[in-house]
Amino acid sequence: MGTRIRPQSGADHQRLRDRLRGRPLLALAMGLLATLGGAAYARQHARAGARAAFRQQAEALVDGVERKFDLALESLRAISALLRAHPGLNDDEFRRFARELMARHQSLAALEWAPLVADADRSTFEAERATELGRPFTIREPGASGGMVGAPRRDRYAPLALLEPFLLDLEGLDIRFEPTRRAAVDTAVASRGLFATAKFRLVEDPPNVYSVAVYDPVPSGGRETGAPPIAGVAIALFRLDPLVRSALAGVDLRTVDFALLDEDPALEQELRILFASRPGAEAPGGGHTVFTKTFRFVGRPWSVVCATPVVASWTAAVLVFGGGTTVSALVAWLLLAREGRRRLQTALRAERELGGYVLGRPLGEGGMGSVFEATHRLLRRRVAIKLVRPERSSPELRERFNREARTMADLSSPHTITLYDYGSADDGRLYVVMEYLDGLTLETLVVADGAQPPERVRHILLQACESLIEAHEAGIVHRDIKPANIMLCKLGGRHDFVKVLDFGLAKATLGGAETKVSRAGVVIGTFTHIAPECLSEPANASARSDLYSLGCVAYELLSGREVFSSADQTSLIAAHLTQVPAPLDHARVPEQLARVVMKCLEKDPNQRFQSARQLAHALIRAELPPWSETHAAEWWHTWRSRSEGGSSAPLTDAESR
């Protein structure tokens, strides 16, 4: 008996349509839920990362403040040692020594010496001191009217006898004139060790300017048995605000709150605040990321409070949400698409594989990818395309690749290689479309043709300066200027037309945070042509670093050899940091041009030309015959004849680094 197949009714068709319609809706709902979860996780991860980064920054700030105070204490110890070695130190000797210390530690407000004088010895001390100074000397203290008056009788005094900077109004001031200061001096003498005071206002300072003092008891030089008596106290005064601000130099206090507190429980709240970047910085409100640390300064318990309201960027969460939403919608749309639409999509994807460009012969290959000659399908324009294979496309490399494209797109100098397009193919390959250049790099030029005429070198350098002038004035530092990244071309009927290549290592220095993929402290560049500051402090790369590298290129073009040459990277680094380049041969290189090149190669950036424009002016002023178009055309004619005869390197040399 045969099996009957029941024809589907209209209701069956509706149920089928509903079922098919429900699948994409379910996929969309699940995708959106997963997207929300992913965005929340990305936000939480970003917050945790921002907190960790802020904690690291805050710890560095605290360490810097501690070091500032500790370094300043070295001056106090040096003064104490001098007073022990020379008990009879006179005013001029003390002040000369103190001035040298204060020049070294500019956070010091004053260095002083206050001998201890018993009441019975007061008259004798005042008379002897007046004789030494050649003017009246009295132990004094501030009077009720604000002026200085003779100190009343007390068991002993600690008058300022030696002080730098010298203030006549403070000479003879008894630093034990009021109970708080008397207790501080007596505590230091009794402990026979360093003692730091709470904050106070110096007699000579206006209101709201506070300082701390550190006392160092100095024993007498007698031969008494047991511990020698204390002859007096050496004093270092620190004005808190300038000292702390010098430690925070470079910190944007608009986004970071900073407070330094004295945790002595006996102090009033006002005296506890040693420094605050703004009112209320010592007690940050809710929503802040807060870092606190306690440390001891000469026995006093101090603490630091760092806070920032900026927790983390929403970028990651927004990207996850946007990407997840897009993917979810795309999946739902794909589930509804028919076979014809899928076929059309496949055809369109193949058409867009490289944005409408047909690849031709390979031009070069290097560490970052390969370079091909290509043609636009519609315009038939010949271009060069740099490709990165999918298996080499790490997130870091993608960022570097995208940054190079964005950087090059911002530059319009005719001496900077022109970017037409960039993107990512469906198979994951990244690509940049650039102008096709008919020529050779300076690296190929030196290898094949040796040292170049000085006038031609100047002609090349001036064009490279034009490219760098635009880049530097836009805040972009190339960071990898070398012969392989400068190309000599025949362009638009002109010979010896220079193009600067490969801004893939460029760094933006204006308009916000530095944009670079490399980790902090990692050296970026080529060791044979890298500036010394890029080796010692990579983050300090500047326009002057490019001028050093361009000086290395000029030296190589004029001499036919690198400034420093070694197969050992350590030796190259040491040479760039410490060695002076061998002088150029003045028999073939004019002295004016040699001086310009050697100025570019100065180790100290401040001793180099300060801009590419300044370097260009110096090159123009050098007395050299011009390198004419006729000279250039003759050279290229000879070069092409040699190339066609197979005795030279290929003419076309594309950037593939």
Image (tube, helix red, strand yellow):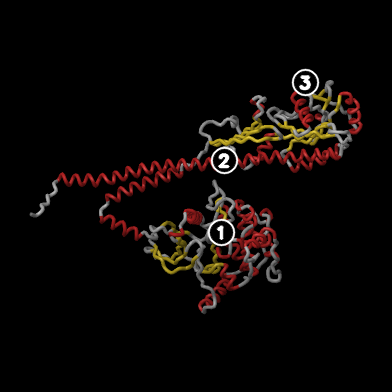
The picture quadrant where one finds residue 249 is top right
Q: Nearer the viewer, residue 534 or 445?
A: 534
The picture quadrant where one finds residue 291 is top right
How far apart marks 1 and 2 lie (CA) works out to 41 Å
The residue tagged 3 is: 145
> Which residue is farthest left?
1
Which amino acid is tagged 2? Arg
Q: Earlier in the sequence, mark 1 or mark 2?
A: 2
Query: Is 513 left or right of 537, judged from the image as shown?
Result: left
Which amino acid is tagged 1? Ser
- Name the residue at 62% across, 40% down: 61
The residue tagged 2 is: 55
The picture quadrant where one finds residue 382 is bottom left
Count the numbered circles shown: 3
Marks 2/3 in contact by CB < 8 Å: the verdict is no
Q: Is residue 144 above or below residue 210?
A: above
**Residue 589 at x, y percent in the picture:** 68, 68
- Choose mark 1 or mark 2, whichever is in front: 2
The residue tagged 1 is: 467
How far apart marks 3 and 1 lie (CA) works out to 70 Å
Q: Is residue 420 above or below residue 243?
A: below
Please say whether residue 544 is visible from this viewpoint.
no
